[in-house]
Image (cartoon, coloured by chain):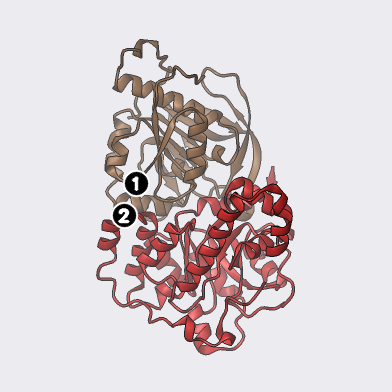
Amino acid sequence: MEQGTSTVKQGLAQMLKGGVIMDVTTPEQAVIAQEAGAVAVMALERVPADIRKEGGVARMADPGIVQAIVDAVTIPVMAKARIGHFVEAEILQSLGVDYIDESEVLTPADEQHHINKKAFKVPFVCGARDLGEALRRIAEGASMIRTKGEAGTGNVVEAVRHMRAIMGEIRRLKNMPEDELVAFAKSIGAPLELVMETQNLGRLPVVNFAAGGIATPADAALMMRLGADGVFVGSGIFKSQDPAVRARAIVEATTYQADAAVLARISRNLGEAMKGLDVASMPQSELLAVRGW
Amino acid sequence: MVDSTSPPITVGVLALQGDVVEHVRSIVASGATAVEVRTRSDLEGVSGLVIPGGESTTVGKLLERFNLLEPLQQRIAGGMPVYGTCTGMILLAKSVEDGLDGQPILGSLDVVVARNGYGRQLESFEATVDLSLPAQEPGSFHGVFIRAPRVRSVGPGVGVLARMGHEIVAVCQGNLLATSFHPELTSDARVHAYFVGMCRAFAAISNPGPDSADVTVPAESEPAP
């Protein structure tokens, strides 16, 4: 019997496909997410919108809160560690979380090195803005990828940009002759073996979710239609007027992404969405997606 | 088992949430046409249904909210074969330990399962299981168990198709098949091929065509109660 293999690490992400993973900061929110039909919850100290507003250093959540969330629900629990902070990751693993998000939403602990995720039994998900970044994270052992988007803005534009970049580069790669692969791998800064594997599969070697700025059922459906395997919703649920109702509608929209009549029905009377920010007018120093490489 | 003379057959994969494309691939590898099932009319057009791996509380809630629970129970009662992996086993089971209060299930298969009965993700594992499909030589199968359900007990009408040591990890009852592991995460399509055979037999009974006399019906073709 073998545990912590790449098959079981990547396999859990495969089981989460077509589902919604919701950011929660308390056990009560975790229960609301589970009732709404979330496939997993993400435990963190503050949702991205509050991290933006309050500033300061954002770290791994208090282990007591993570433990309380693990105890409150029966669905998988993920938790965020800072980029490069392998000790936070070891602490989260010891708490028995099901996935760790090495996340740019928290303040990076290392500007050069991401966590060596292969050294862990618990699987990791990492953010990416393009194919090269996704494959670098997979090379370090990430078992799941998500777009970075621009977390805490309620604005889906960056998630769309990142998903289109990844899917577009894969489409280009699919038709690329073998003698151009080495130069392509060099240009995107990714290992050749993973570039070749992506070409063979015609998709990323691991599951790829959308994240960052998803605030409505239509946003979730849009990301699915652009090729996402599922969605993460951060501030979009618990910064809206009626989290339980909105969470449920986003779950349904992720499944019935291609049925506009169903989407019209479930998008009604959800109360106000989170207010949102215009990413184009934000100073570079406030952008989270540029953290990590 | 499948050759060019086998009549075309359509097997559905419940596509509310979970590892749908992996099952589609295994069904196609077993010689059938696979379609994704999200609505009542999708359900009416298939000769069998796979309930994939996923999050059982999510899939159960979506079955209920989109009014698919009863139509699916009716098709099961009408003899349509259903194969559940992991989450699918939980949804088919008559009784679920450690489920969510009021978690919607189909309740058709006479087994008691414990949800996440082998533990959380850190305890997920790969192991060899002893597989013994009807009318086939017993052999080993590579089992991938992810936050898997654990079979606590089985009713008298339930056949055991695979064990891992003393643990029951695959069962069959009439038109229902369930595994707590994920054959769709491997390239070994034996379990799916067996299920497609059940679907062929069902299609031959429900739509007898001119060649139906040539179709061999497996011994267990009684619908589950």
Q: Which quarter of the figure is the C terminus of chain A placed in?
A: bottom right
Task: Residue A186: name its quadrant.
Answer: bottom right
Expressed as whole percent of the image width and height from the top left, the position of residue A275 reads 38, 82
Residue closer to the observer: B207 or A97: B207
Expressed as whole percent of the image width and height from the top left, the position of residue A160 reads 48, 67
| Residue A22 in the image: above or below residue A204 | below
Kindly identify which chain the residue marked by label 2 belongs to: A
- Measure the C-alpha gap from mark 1 to mark 2: 10 Å
| Residue B162 in the image: above or below residue B186 | above
Q: Secondary structure at mark 1?
A: loop
Report the residue at 65% width, 59% height from top.
A122
User: Which one is in front in this view, the residue at disc 1 or the one at disc 2?
Assistant: 2
Q: Residues within 10 Å of mark 1 (few under 14, many from 20)?
A: many
Q: Colour of chain A?
A: red
Give amino acid for label 2. Answer: Asp
Chain letter, brown in picture: B
Report the residue at 47% width, 35% height from top.
B178
Give amino acid for label 1. Answer: Arg
Residue that badge 2 annotates: A259
| Residue A288 in the image: above or below residue A233 | below
* Mark sitting on residue A163: none
The answer to whether residue B102 is seen in the rendering is: no
Q: Which quarter of the figure is the N terminus of chain A placed in?
A: top right
Expressed as whole percent of the image width and height from the top left, the position of residue A17 reads 49, 53
Horizontal side, residue A136 vs residue A280: left or right: right
Residue that badge 1 annotates: B38
Kindly identify which chain the residue marked by label 1 belongs to: B
Q: Do tag 1 and tag 2 residues touch (Cβ < 8 Å)?
A: yes
Horizontal side, residue A200 vs residue B72: left or right: right
| Residue B91 in the image: above or below residue A236 | above
Report the residue at 72% width, 78% height from top.
A111
Expressed as whole percent of the image width and height from the top left, the position of residue A48 reads 51, 78
